[in-house]
Every structure is written in structure tokens, then in C-alpha cells.
């Protein structure tokens, strides 16, 4: 219990910002319709899979964004707790 936990808030904030920026630039350019005039089952299945991949990408970016917001909120809460503890220790 005697170990000290140190958080480099600016480093965590920068990492979260970097993740946000990277997710915004995540681009797959998956074609949603290949061989649209073709009636082969394979091309239909490929189109379905490409559509599913696009949806998964959107969900991943949304989940990543929610996770980053949670990290930011946790960081704010930890900073506030640190300040309160520091103030109470200084008052003693």
C-alpha cells in the first residue's frame, strides 16, 4: 500500500487525442457494389460482406469515441480527487 500512483495527465490526454484523430482518418474505401450487372451469387455475397465491413467500421469508430470520452471523464475525476486530497493533506 505504500506505493505511489502517478498519472501524467497531459500524456493521457494527448494519447486520447491521438486516438480520436486517428479514428477520424480511418478510411477503408470498401466498394459497396461490384459487378452490379452481374448475377453471380459470389458478387452478391461480396457486396453484402463489403456492406457489413463498412457497418463494422462505423460501429468501431463510435465505440472508440465513447471509450475515449469515458477515459477523458475518468481523467477529470482523478484530477479532481487529486486536488481534493492534496488540499486536505495541506490543511493538516
Image (cartoon, rainbow, N blue to C red):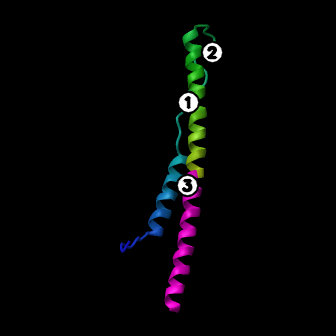
Badge 2 marks a residue whose secondary structure is loop
| Image quadrant containing the N terminus | bottom left
- Is 48 or 71 nearer to us in this picture? 71
Q: Which residue is mark 3?
A: 68
Q: Quadrant of residue 47?
A: top right
Q: Is residue 58 above or below residue 32?
A: below
- Magenta stretch holds residue 27: no
Mark 2 or mark 3: whose residue is earlier in sequence: 2
Which of the 4 quarters of the picture holds residue 31? top right
Name the dominant secondary structure of the magenta segment.
helix
Q: Which residue is mark 2?
A: 36
Residue closest to the far bottom:
92
Q: Earlier in the sequence, mark 1 or mark 2?
A: 2
Nearest to the eye among marks 1 and 3: give it.
3
Q: Residue furthest top?
A: 39
User: Seen from this angle, which residue lies furthest right?
Assistant: 37
Residue visible at 60% across and 14% down in the picture: 44
Mark 1–mark 3 distance (CA, rounded to whole Å): 22 Å
Calculate the distance from the C-alpha at mark 1 to the C-alpha at mark 2: 18 Å
Of residue 54 and residue 64, the one placed in the foreground of this image is 64
Locate residue 70, reporting x and y percent. 58, 57
For residue 65, above or below residue 40: below
Answer yes or no: do the residues labelled 1 and 3 have beta carbons within 8 Å? no
Q: Which residues are magenta?
A: 67-92
Between the C-alphas of marks 2 and 3, the distance is 39 Å
Q: Nearer the viewer, residue 37 or 13?
A: 13
Label whose residue precedes the other's in the sequence (1 or 3): 1
Residue 7: percent from left, percent from top: 44, 69
Disc 2 crowd rating (10 Å Cα; few below 14, some 14-19, many 20+) is few
Picture layout, residue 39 above or below residue 66: above
Mark drawn on residue 53: 1
Amino acid at each position: 500500500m505504500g506505493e505511489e500512483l502517478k498519472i501524467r495527465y497531459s500524456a493521457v490526454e494527448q494519447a486520447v487525442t491521438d486516438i480520436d484523430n486517428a479514428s477520424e482518418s480511418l478510411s477503408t474505401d470498401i466498394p459497396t457494389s461490384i459487378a452490379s450487372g452481374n448475377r453471380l451469387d459470389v458478387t452478391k455475397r461480396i457486396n453484402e460482406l463489403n456492406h457489413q465491413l463498412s457497418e463494422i467500421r462505423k460501429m468501431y469508430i463510435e465505440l472508440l469515441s465513447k471509450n475515449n470520452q469515458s477515459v477523458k471523464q475518468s481523467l477529470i475525476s482523478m484530477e479532481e480527487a487529486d486536488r481534493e486530497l492534496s488540499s486536505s493533506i495541506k490543511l493538516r
